[in-house]
Image (cartoon, grey):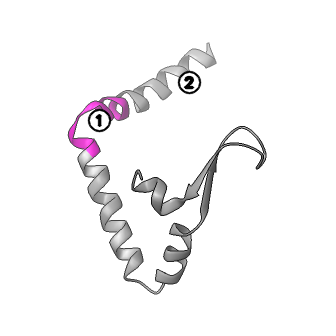
Amino acid sequence: MPFRRSARRVRRVLDPVVEFLRIEAVGGALLLAATIAALALANSPLADAYQRLWQQELTVGACAGMCGIGSMTAYAANDT
């Protein structure tokens, strides 16, 4: 019985979140928030760290450095 009560509580909290994420406008709001955060970081005292983040090597693959797709983070984000 305690499991069912906790499952109901979790569902009561998660159902509005799931419904909110289904709305198409959420994607635009998240993109706008990410843009504002990026602009704020790029123009703050943390700008050097922000630039180093974009120059990091990004590797996607199942092997430890032996295979996969690697590129700079900025190129991966720009889809080039």
Q: What residue lies at 47% left-to-right and 62% top-to-bottom?
A: 74
Relative to 56, is 33 on the left or the right?
left
Q: Amino acid at mark 2?
A: Ser
Relative to 44, is 53 on the left or the right?
right
Q: Residue furthest left?
A: 25
Q: Quadrant of residue 55?
A: bottom right
Q: Measure the C-alpha gap from mark 2 to mark 1.
A: 22 Å
Q: Residues within 10 Å of mark 1 (few under 14, many from 20)?
A: few
Identify the mark nearer the N-term, 2 or 1.
Answer: 2
Vertical order, 44 against 7 (above or below)? below
Vertical order, 14 against 43 (above or below)? above
Which element carries disc 2, helix, strand or loop? helix
Indicate the position of residue 50 as horizontal and vertical percent values. Answer: 49, 74
* Depth check, front residue: 1 or 17: 17
Q: What residue lies at 55% left-to-right and 69% top-to-bottom?
A: 53
The residue that label 1 is drawn on is 20
**Which is more foreground, mark 2 or mark 1?**
1
Q: Amino acid at mark 1?
A: Phe
Relative to 34, is 47 on the left or the right?
right
The residue that label 2 is drawn on is 6
Indicate the position of residue 43 as horizontal and vertical percent values. Answer: 37, 82
Which element carries disc 1, helix, strand or loop? helix
| 18 within the magenta span | yes
Q: What residue lies at 36% left-to-right and 35% top-to-bottom?
A: 17
**Quadrant for the N terminus in the image:** top right
Vertical order, 10 against 40 (above or below)? above
Check residue 38 in the rendering and tell me which mark sits there, or answer none: none
Indicate the position of residue 8 as horizontal and vertical percent values. Answer: 48, 20
Q: Which residues are magenta?
A: 16-27
* Depth check, front residue: 16 or 27: 27
Relative to 76, is 19 on the left or the right?
left
Q: Quadrant of residue 13?
A: top left
